[in-house]
């Protein structure tokens, strides 16, 4: 005996409804666990983002300090040799607001070599120290 098409469709529909009624859905425990996992992932992501931002700021600070220190050393080297720092004019450029430089010079060897040390500070803490040497070329003997 053949089943009419409408009856077969109706039976399939009833089977789907029974199947859906037998499923209970997502429990509260599953929902809490899913939210906790998403929270852990979000905290890890935000922590990595904060670390990256901090590292970038530190790198920017060190780069600016290095540019300032190298500029000061080059200015001192371009001036006439003087055994004391007082003779050198060191000015912090306005684009380095908040940065200060402490320059010390020490005469070494036989008085014609000078060690230049530039310590750069930003917001009260030392960021970078660079050292270089300057030679009094007027005392050198030409061949």
Image (cartoon, helix red, strand yellow):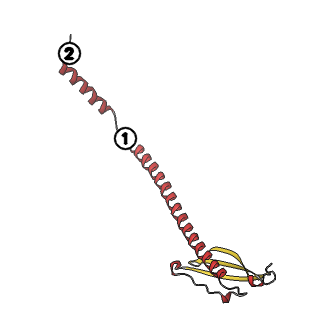
Please tell me whether residue 109 is drawn above or below residue 45 in the rendered image.
below
Q: Position of residue 4 (x, y in %)?
A: 18, 17
Q: Which mark is residue 5?
A: none
Whether residue 136 is visible to the viewer of this picture, yes or no, is no
Picture layout, residue 27 above or below residue 19: below
Would residue 72 appear left or right of 4 to someone viewing this image? right
Label 1–label 2 contact, CB within 8 A: no
Q: Residue at x 51, y 63 (%)?
A: 53
Q: Dot 2, how many residues are within 10 Å of its Cα: few (below 14), some (14-19), or many (20+)?
A: few
Q: Residues within 10 Å of mark 1 (few under 14, many from 20)?
A: few
Label 1 element class: loop
Sequence-wise first label, 1 or 2: 2
Using the numbered discs, state the Cα–Cα distance from disc 1 to disc 2 in whole angstroms: 37 Å
Task: Give coordinates of residue 113: x percent, y percent.
Answer: 76, 80
| Quadrant (top left, top right, bottom left, bottom right) of the N terminus | top left
Residue furthest to the bottom in view is 86
Left or right side of 66 for 32? left
The residue that appears at 69% across and 75% down in the rendered structure is 131
Coordinates of residue 26 in the picture (x, y in percent): 37, 41
Q: Nearer the viewer, residue 104 or 42?
A: 104
In terms of depth relative to the viewer, which is nearer, 77 or 141?
A: 141
| Residue topped by disc 1 | 26
Q: Is residue 75 above or below residue 26?
A: below
Do we see residue 12 in this rendering?
yes
Residue found at the very far top of the displayed protein: 1
Q: Position of residue 38 (x, y in %)?
A: 44, 50
Q: Which residue is label 2 attached to?
A: 3
User: SS class of the residue under badge 2?
Assistant: loop
């Amino acid at each position: 005996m053949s089943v009419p098409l409408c009856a077969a469709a109706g039976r399939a529909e009833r089977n789907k409804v029974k199947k859906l009624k037998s499923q209970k859905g997502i429990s509260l425990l599953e929902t809490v666990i899913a939210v906790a996992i998403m929270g852990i992932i979000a905290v890890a992501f935000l922590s990595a983002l904060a670390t990256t931002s901090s590292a970038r700021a530190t790198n920017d600070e060190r780069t600016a300090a290095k540019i300032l220190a190298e500029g000061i050393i080059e200015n001192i080297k371009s001036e006439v040799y003087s055994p004391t720092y007082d003779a050198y004019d060191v000015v912090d450029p306005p684009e380095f607001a908040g940065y200060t430089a402490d320059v010390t010079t020490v005469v070494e060897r036989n008085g014609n070599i000078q060690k230049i040390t530039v310590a750069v500070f930003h917001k009260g803490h030392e960021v970078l120290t660079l050292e270089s040497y300057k030679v009094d070329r007027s005392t050198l003997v030409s061949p």
